Image: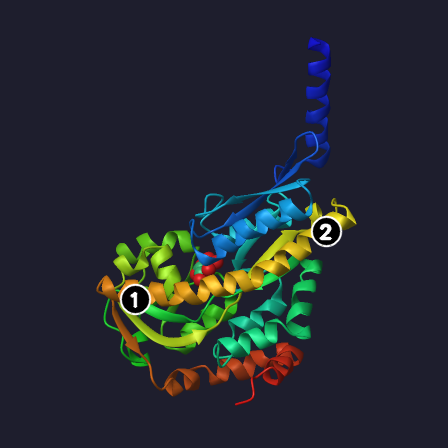
Amino acid sequence: MKHFKRSVLVMMVMIAITFGFSSFSFSADQMVLKLSEIHGKGYPTELADEEFARLVNLYTKGQIKVDVFPGGQISGDEKVVIEQVKIGAIAIARVSSGALGSFNPQLNVFALPFIFDSKDHMWSFLNGTAGQKMLADLAPSGFVGLCWYDGGARSFYANYPLNTIEDLKGKKFRVMPNAILVKMVEAMGASAVPMGAGQVFSAIQTKVIDGAENNAPSLISFNHYQVAKYYMLDEHLRLPEVLFMSKMVWDKLSKDQQAAIRKAAGETVKFQRAKWDAYEIEAMNKIKAEGQIVVEIKDNTPFRNAVKQLLADESPKFAETIKAINAAKPKK
Ligand code: BDP
């Protein structure tokens, strides 16, 4: 008996060595896949991750269990998480396309300010052929794109009053590590400081930076509203969120398991969008109730003008996609 136990153990260790990854583990007939999420429990993308996990378990009849690690437990820096997914150390992640763009340049079209007119415009593109093809085109970078989620619109916030674009001049704003986002902030007159989301709170608190840019739900999620009291709604970016998988891990699954994962992911999109729409309003109300000064920018022409040259320089790299984005504009 003892010997039997030992040989089973040896076999399991050998399997682990053969696969060489901690992104998944096996029990008798179950594979466990790790999913990294920067937001905490209850955030719209985290709820979607949990729903995805439930559906994967259901559709694979328990063969695959997805373990969600929320709240940046694996890393508060999505760049680090993406690197881990690339080498198969983490099986699945939900990140911002702004972070993933540094690994798969086609995604940087979303880092171009004011590329979408509205939420409807973004979704009409993402759900269309060109938007879905972008998920498939993650493959050469070592990823399998599963689905898009809503990430709302991003605006600037700071620890000093923000009312117009002029107020950005000479100040330091955090961006995700992405060359286009750096250029965007510079075009608007400020200096850009790329860093992972996990460092932003203390960077604002210690005045290493003056502010950052994000959607209202993230200001709550990361507690940034506590250290940056001024929020200027210029809505310069709509960066979709993306759920994706390590191609190295994907390639080890059976065709049926792959199909089950795709089906599960596809079914969480509506779920996430509904959670997002409700939480976007709730988060904005909470921020205001907590005393944050929120300024609506009624006419964002000065912001659009500031990035005209940047768009002229960068757009040719994404000509085909931009054509599809323009064609997806909902008819007025
Ligand atoms: C939030 C995204 C999150 C990013 C974060 C950021 O949901 O995935 O990590 O922005 O700015 O909106 O880094």
Q: The disc labelled 2 sits on which kind of residue?
A: Gln
224 is higher (above) or lower (below) than 157: above
Tell me the quarter of the image containing the N terminus.
top right
- Report how many numbered discs are placed on residues in the image: 2
Q: How is the image coloured?
A: rainbow
**Extreme residue in the bottom direction:** 332
Q: Position of residue 80 (x, y in %)?
A: 52, 49
For disc 1, the neighbor class at 10 Å (few under 14, some 14 to 19, many from 20) is few
Q: Earlier in the sequence, mark 2 or mark 1?
A: 2
Q: Indicate left or right for 307 with 32 as reference.
A: left
Q: Position of residue 213 (x, y in %)?
A: 38, 67
Check disc 2 and report its element: helix, strand or loop: helix
Q: Residue at x 76, y 49 (%)?
A: 256
**Is residue 213 visible in the rendered structure shown here?**
no
Check disc 1 and report its element: helix, strand or loop: helix
The residue tagged 1 is 285
In three-dimensional space, the C-alpha distance between marks 2 and 1, rounded to whole angstroms, equals: 40 Å
Q: Position of residue 161 (x, y in %)?
A: 23, 72
Q: Indicate left or right for 73 with 2 as reference.
A: left
Q: The disc labelled 1 sits on which kind of residue?
A: Asn
**Extreme residue in the right direction:** 255
163 is higher (above) or lower (below) than 264: below
Tell me the quarter of the picture where residue 142 sits: bottom right
Q: Which mark is residue 258?
A: 2
Q: Position of residue 100 (x, y in %)?
A: 56, 60
